[in-house]
Image (cartoon, grey):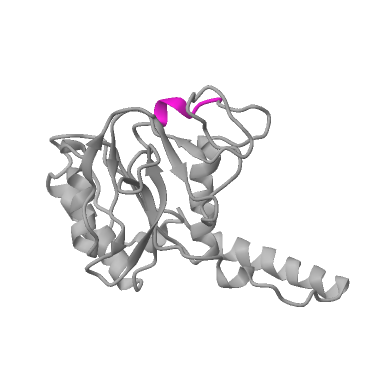
Amino acid sequence: SSVYNDYDNFDQIWVYDLSSDTDVYANQMANYNAIANWYNDKGKPHIIADGRILGSSSNWTSRTNGTGHSEEAWIQNYAIQLDLRGGGLVLATDQATAFTRGINEINSLIGINPFTNFWYQEPYEASVDSGSELYIDGLVARDPLYFAPGETCLNDNSSTSDVPYGLQSNGEILYPVAFHGGDITRVAISTTIDGPPPQAESVPAPPAVALLGIAAAGIFAARRRKAGQV
């Protein structure tokens, strides 16, 4: 029942469009506009678009072979990679029917193409570019109950949609990360992230004492930055 206007109060913005007919009422539309304003005012921070996350959500829980890698780890890496780059926006949805109405309102407002189509056929897996910064080892194989270290397929079960990729009207480029069933014309995940964050570049190692001082200062700064945030 609330409309949020200042998204700087949040550490993360996750937009899940889960309903079919009630996702474009007045408050929702106000939030979509507020999110779009946040994105545009911030100078277009990084985007991750995932068109299969919700259709595969029932297979997230307790799926592990001891490596600790699972669907949850893949999604957690979204937050990690965006945090390394100063934040951004994850747009994730399901089948491109009524369920994408709200999220496509946001896409339109920030100048990227809509989620489209309807994928519901075997193989129920999305082949992943292992060179992507979003990639982690040990992904969900075709049978979502099991994992294979080094597997480069994500669970793509149920009704999923194609995500926008390539040059968008806002001037951003969305790079494909994963493909439905290995079909390179059907993109399951895309992102504006292209390469490691600037702070990940190699630098000469400082002396041990100096490194300790840097770490302590970083912890202090992080705690102060997090203070008061939702």
Vertical placement of 160 versus 59: above or below? below
Q: Residue at x 61, y 63 (%)?
A: 222
> Where in the figure is residue 200, as x and y percent of width and height?
63, 68
Q: Quadrant of residue 160?
A: top left
Q: Quadrant of residue 16?
A: top left
Reply yes or no: does residue 60 show up in magenta: yes
Counting the numbered discs, the total is: 0
Q: Nearer the viewer, residue 199 or 51?
A: 51
Reply yes or no: does residue 121 show up in magenta: no
Q: Residue at x 51, y 52 (%)?
A: 134
Q: Residue at x 14, y 45 (%)?
A: 24
- Is any atom of residue 228 visible in this view? no
> Where in the figure is residue 46, as x and y percent of width and height?
40, 63
> Where in the figure is residue 228, as x and y percent of width and height?
50, 58
Q: Nearer the viewer, residue 114 or 221?
A: 114
230 sits left or right of 118 in the view: right
Vertical placement of 137 versus 32: above or below? above
208 sits left or right of 219 in the view: right
Q: Nearer the viewer, residue 211 or 110?
A: 110
Vertical placement of 53 versus 215: above or below? above
Report the magenta residues as a range. 57-62
Q: Residue at x 21, y 41 (%)?
A: 117
Q: Nearer the viewer, residue 210 or 77?
A: 77
Vertical placement of 207 versus 192: above or below? below
- Is any atom of residue 148 visible in this view? yes
Q: Quadrant of residue 1?
A: top left
> Where in the figure is residue 162, as x and y percent of width and height?
28, 45
